[in-house]
C-alpha cells in the first residue's frame, strides 16, 4: 500500500490550460482562408511599376492595347532598321506602309473604341458636304484608367517620333524616305486630331447634359435656367 500511495502521490493532475489548447487551435483553423483573385493582384500598387506585364495585367483590354503598341512600334522599327536588314528599298517601303495602314485602321476602329470608348469618321451628305461624326460611350461607364493613359500616350508620342524622323530625313538628304515619313505623319496626325476632337465633343455633350438636367432640376424656373446656361457656357469654353 505504501508503494501504491507513493505512486499516486507522484502523479500530478493535468493542467487545464494544456487540455484546452487543442480546442483553441481547432477554432483558429476554422477561419476562412484568404483567396487572392486576379482583380486583387491587379489593384496592388506595385503592379503599376512592374513593367509591361503589370500594365497588361491592369488593362481591361490587353489584346487591343498590345496591338496598338505593336503596330506603331513595328512601323518605326522597320523604318529605322530597313537599311540594315535589307537593301531592297521597295520591300522595306511596302512593309512600312502595310504596318502604317494596319495601325491606322486598328487605332481608329478597334483601339479607340475599346480603350477609351471614342470613335470618329468623315461622312458626306447628299449635298456633297463633308463633316465629322463623333461617337462616345456612356459617361456612366468610364474607361479603364490604365487603358486611357496608355492610349493617349501612344496617340501623341508616336506622331512626335515620326516628326523627328522627318526632320532627320531632311537633314540627311534622304529624299527617298521622305514620302514614307510623310505618309506616317498623315496617318498619325489624322488619328490624333480626330480622337482629340472626339474626346472634346464627348466632354461637351456630357457637360451640356449635366447643365440642362442637374441645375434645372435642383433650382427650377428662371433661376435654374440662368445657372444652367452659365454652367454650359463656362464648361464649353473650358473644353472648347
Image (tube, rainbow, N blue to C red):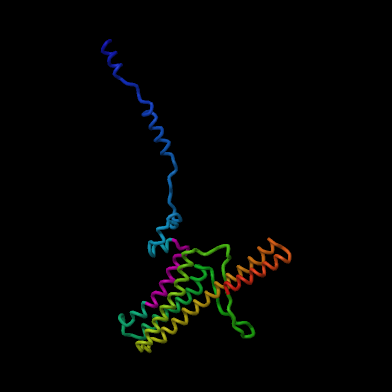
Q: As displayed, is residue 152 above or below residue 5? A: below
The reply, left or right, for residue 58 in relation to residue 119 is left
At 41% from the left edge and 32% from the top edge, which residue is drawn?
23
Quadrant occupied by the C terminus: bottom right
Q: Residue at x 39, y 82 (%)?
A: 165
Q: Is residue 18 above or below residue 106?
A: above
Residue at the limit of the structure toward the left, as seen here: 3
The total number of labels drawn is 0
Provide residue 78's location: percent of width, then percent of height.
36, 78
Instruction: State which quadrant residue 197 falls in.
Output: bottom right
Q: Which quarter of the figure is the N terminus placed in? A: top left
Where does the image place residue 24, in percent across and percent down from the top left?
Answer: 41, 34
Say above or below: 10 vs 85. Answer: above
Most distant residue in the top direction: 1
The front one of 24 and 93 is 24
Say if 67 sits above or below 162 in the image. above
Q: Residue at x 41, y 83 (%)?
A: 181
Image quadrant in which you'd find residue 99: bottom left
Q: Position of residue 132 (x, y in %)?
A: 58, 78
Q: Nearer the viewer, residue 101 or 120?
A: 120
Relative image position of residue 46 (x, y in whole percent):
40, 58
- Is 73 in the magenta? yes
Q: Main secondary structure of the magenta part?
A: helix
Residue 166 part of the magenta segment: no
The answer to which quarter of the image holds residue 122 is bottom right
Q: Nearer the viewer, residue 175 or 93?
A: 175
- Identify the magenta region: 58-76
Amino acid at each position: 500500500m505504501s508503494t501504491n500511495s507513493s505512486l499516486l502521490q507522484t502523479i500530478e493532475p493535468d493542467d487545464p490550460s494544456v487540455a484546452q489548447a487543442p480546442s483553441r487551435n481547432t477554432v483558429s483553423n476554422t477561419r476562412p482562408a484568404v483567396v487572392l483573385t486576379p482583380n486583387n493582384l491587379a489593384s496592388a500598387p506595385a503592379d503599376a511599376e512592374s513593367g509591361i506585364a503589370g500594365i497588361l495585367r491592369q488593362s481591361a483590354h490587353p489584346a487591343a492595347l498590345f496591338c496598338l503598341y505593336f503596330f506603331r512600334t513595328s512601323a518605326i522599327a522597320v523604318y529605322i532598321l530597313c537599311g540594315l536588314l535589307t537593301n531592297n528599298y521597295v520591300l522595306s517601303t511596302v512593309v512600312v506602309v502595310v504596318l502604317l495602314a494596319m495601325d491606322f485602321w486598328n487605332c481608329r476602329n478597334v483601339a479607340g473604341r475599346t480603350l477609351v470608348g471614342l470613335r470618329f469618321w468623315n461622312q458626306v451628305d447628299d449635298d456633297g458636304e463633308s463633316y465629322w461624326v463623333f461617337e462616345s460611350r456612356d459617361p456612366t461607364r468610364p474607361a479603364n484608367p490604365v487603358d486611357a493613359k496608355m492610349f493617349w500616350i501612344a496617340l501623341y508620342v508616336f506622331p512626335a517620333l515620326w516628326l523627328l524622323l522627318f526632320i532627320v530625313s531632311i537633314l540627311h538628304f534622304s529624299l527617298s524616305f521622305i514620302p514614307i515619313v510623310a505618309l506616317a505623319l498623315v496617318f498619325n496626325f489624322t488619328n490624333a486630331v480626330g480622337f482629340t476632337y472626339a474626346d472634346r465633343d464627348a466632354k461637351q455633350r456630357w457637360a451640356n447634359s449635366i447643365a440642362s438636367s442637374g441645375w434645372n432640376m435642383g433650382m427650377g424656373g428662371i433661376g435654374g435656367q440662368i445657372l444652367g446656361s452659365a454652367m454650359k457656357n463656362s464648361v464649353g469654353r473650358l473644353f472648347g
